[in-house]
Image (cartoon, rainbow, N blue to C red):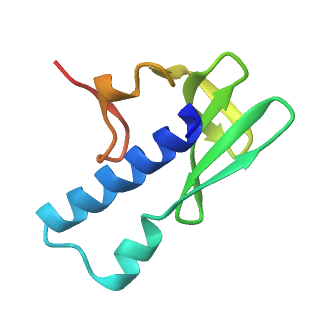
Amino acid sequence: MNKITEFAELLEREQIERLHQNKLDCSDNIHNAKVSVKKGNKYTKVDVGSSGKYMIDKEGNIWGIKAYGVIRRGHYYGTVDTIHSYYWGDYAAVKKS
C-alpha cells in the first residue's frame, strides 16, 4: 500500500469514527465521509464526500485547500510520513500532543 492510500484510509476511518462517537452516523453522513483520491499533474487531491479537503504535493506535503485545486499554504498538515501525528476526524486535522 502506498502512503497516499494509507492516508486516505486513515482519514476516512477517523471521519466515520467521529460520526459514530457523536451519534451522527446515519447512512447519508457515512456516505459523505467516504474518501476519494484524484491524481493530478502537480498535486494529488484527497476529497471527503464530494468536497475537496486536502492536497498532497510531489514531496508528500499535505495541505488544506483554498479552492478546489488551489492549496492554502497556511494550512500545512505534515507529510505522508507523519500522518499518525495528526487526528483527521475533525473538520480540519489536529496535531496530536
- In percent of width and height, residue 50 lies at 59, 65
- Eyeballing the image, is 12 above or below 24? above
Side of 37 where 20 appears, left or right: left
Side of 50 where 88 appears, left or right: left
- In percent of width and height, residue 6 lies at 48, 40
- Eyeballing the image, is 13 above or below 2? below
- In percent of width and height, residue 23 lies at 14, 72
Side of 3 where 83 appears, left or right: left
- In percent of width and height, residue 88 lies at 34, 41
Q: Residue furthest front?
A: 1
Quadrant of the frame with the N terminus? top right
Quadrant of residue 30 within the rendered picture: bottom left
Please state which of residues 13 and 88 is positioned toward the viewer in this rendering: 13
Quadrant of residue 20 within the rendered picture: bottom left
Residue name at image x 23 percent, y 64 percent: 19
Q: Residue furthest bottom?
A: 27
Q: Residue furthest right?
A: 41
Please state which of residues 41 and 71 is positioned toward the viewer in this rendering: 41
Residue name at image x 52 percent, y 65 percent: 49
Quadrant of the frame with the C terminus? top left
- Eyeballing the image, is 32 above or below 79? below
Residue name at image x 14 percent, y 64 percent: 22
Residue name at image x 67 percent, y 15 percent: 59
Please state which of residues 37 and 76 is positioned toward the viewer in this rendering: 37
Numbered marks: total: 0
Side of 60 where 79 appears, left or right: left
Please state which of residues 37 and 65 is positioned toward the viewer in this rendering: 37
Quadrant of residue 63 within the rendered picture: top right
